[in-house]
Amino acid sequence: MISLQPAKNGYLNSLPHLIWLLLLTSPVIGQTKFVANYDENKIPAYELPAILTMQDGTPVSTAQQWREKRRPELMDLFAKQVYGRSPEACPIQSKVISTTDAIQGKALRREVDVTFGGKSDSVTMRLLIYTPKDAKASPAFLTLNFQGNHSIDPDPSISLNSNWMRNRSGITENNLSSEKSRGVAASRWPVELIIDHGFALVTIYYGDIDPDFDDQFKNGVHSALRSEASSIPNEEKWGSIAGWSYGLSRAMDYLQQDNQIDGNRVAVFGHSRLGKTSLWAGASDERFKLVISNNSGCGGAALSRRAIGETIWRINTSFPHWFCDNYPLYNENERDCPVDQHQLIALIAPRAVYVASATEDRWADPKGEFLSALQADEVYRLLGTDGMGGSAPPEKMPQADQAIRSGTIGYHLRTGKHDVTTYDWEQYIAFAKRHL
Ligand code: GTR
């Protein structure tokens, strides 16, 4: 579904304009036409939807009004207009696949298969779990990964993933896992650092839950829970981000039964599209006590109305399966979207949230990510926390590598590119120590 705004722009008045419009909105040709704006002076004038005002204009001034009225209203809007509505939680089954010592004996490493589904089918996701060796019930970081569990560490005993995997040039249905792909993403996963600070790390290959390509939802969770989702109107049905989030919640169901993990102290973390996913998982499932978005950008932490770097049109065109079918209504039409992403951050309140950007990641709009977190401050304070810290929110975006992490909303702008680095993890670990 693509919003063409014909009336507003008067495009449909003549045949040449109609042809031009079709070219602009064609996914293939449109890709070559899109030139991202990176100029702050060219951001369209915008007004953010208020967080503390109901859709009918009623102001929200108490924690109770937030909890009982505004929060449910916003959850519903994000579900119906952005990510799509997911079916109810379903039961899970788990099976331990392997248990071994790891990290020079400092950790116990387990692989646990968690299976869930509905009437038609099921999916199995393999959890790779590192827990500090002699600790009982550790706090944990729960995360999805892009390239298979075996990509996070070269350890040859981690099982290779045989599911669909993305290649560098795009998407493919080939299985690209091989001995050579072991540890390819290790720089993003400082497992030893995490363990040394007393945390568990739980990671899952995101393709176990839903393969990341547009196949009209023939596979993954969408297929497994098709009949459970059948009563949801088509335009409100869950996209892949909601599907991956649903998988994170089922992983959380498992973690609550695992006596090596403290199910009340679990952070959900994700990078990029998986950062968008961790935010939606954190908003949807209040069992996550800390939510971390690393370079999540458009459809994640960044304000959509700034339309800088990646835009709603761009993301819906490149990745039509990530969001629900209502979301393209806001293609090049951000102002009509009833929500913006600062409200997503607010949905996590009063639980701790951390948003991180990178200086060279202009596609994800670092400033828009910061402004989102800043705007959510008022809800955090209404709910009795210190928001971004101090007696009032900061007036300016911090300098690069000057993390704000004294409050309940953390933020940093790291020097460098779109990535996850040890610097990022050091901030998350320090923040998690205070909040988990
Ligand atoms: C990009 C996409 C971003 C971000 C990123 C990723 O192609 O435009 O929204 O999610 O992929 O997930 O790696």
Image: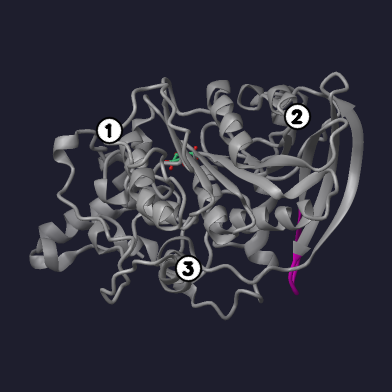
Q: Residue at 86% of width from left, 28% of height from top?
A: 157
Whichever of callouts 2 and 3 sits on the residue coming sooner in the sequence is: 3
The numbered mark, 1 or 2, whose residue comes first in the sequence reads 2
Under circle 2, the secondary element is loop
In the picture, measured across the screen, residue 417 lies left or right of residue 168, that is left
> Is disc 2 surrounded by few (<14), some (14 to 19) or many (20+) residues within 10 Å?
few
Q: 122 or 253: which is nearer to us?
A: 253
Question: Callout 1, which amino acid?
Answer: Lys
Q: Is mark 3 on a helix, strand or loop?
A: helix
Residue 316 showing in the rendered view: no
The residue indicated by pointer 3 is 67
Residue 72 % position (x, y): 47, 70
The location of residue 131, given as percent across then percent down, is 80, 35
Please state if 216 lies on the left or on the right of 88 as rendered.
left
Q: Please, is residue 10 above or below residue 431 in the view?
A: below
User: Could you tell me how far apart the alpha carbons at marks 1 and 2 are, in whole angstroms?
Assistant: 47 Å
The C terminus - image quarter: top right
Residue 184 found in image quarter: top right
Residue at 31% x, 32% y is 397
Q: Residue 178 carries which label?
A: 2
Q: Which quadrant: the N terminus?
A: bottom left
| Structural crowding at the residue carrying mark 3, measured as other residues with C-alpha within 10 Å and reported as few (<14), some (14–19) or many (≥20) | some
How many numbered circles does the render carry?
Answer: 3
CB at mark 1 closer than 8 A to ligand 1? no
Chain part drawn in magenta? 117-124
The residue that disc 1 covers is 396
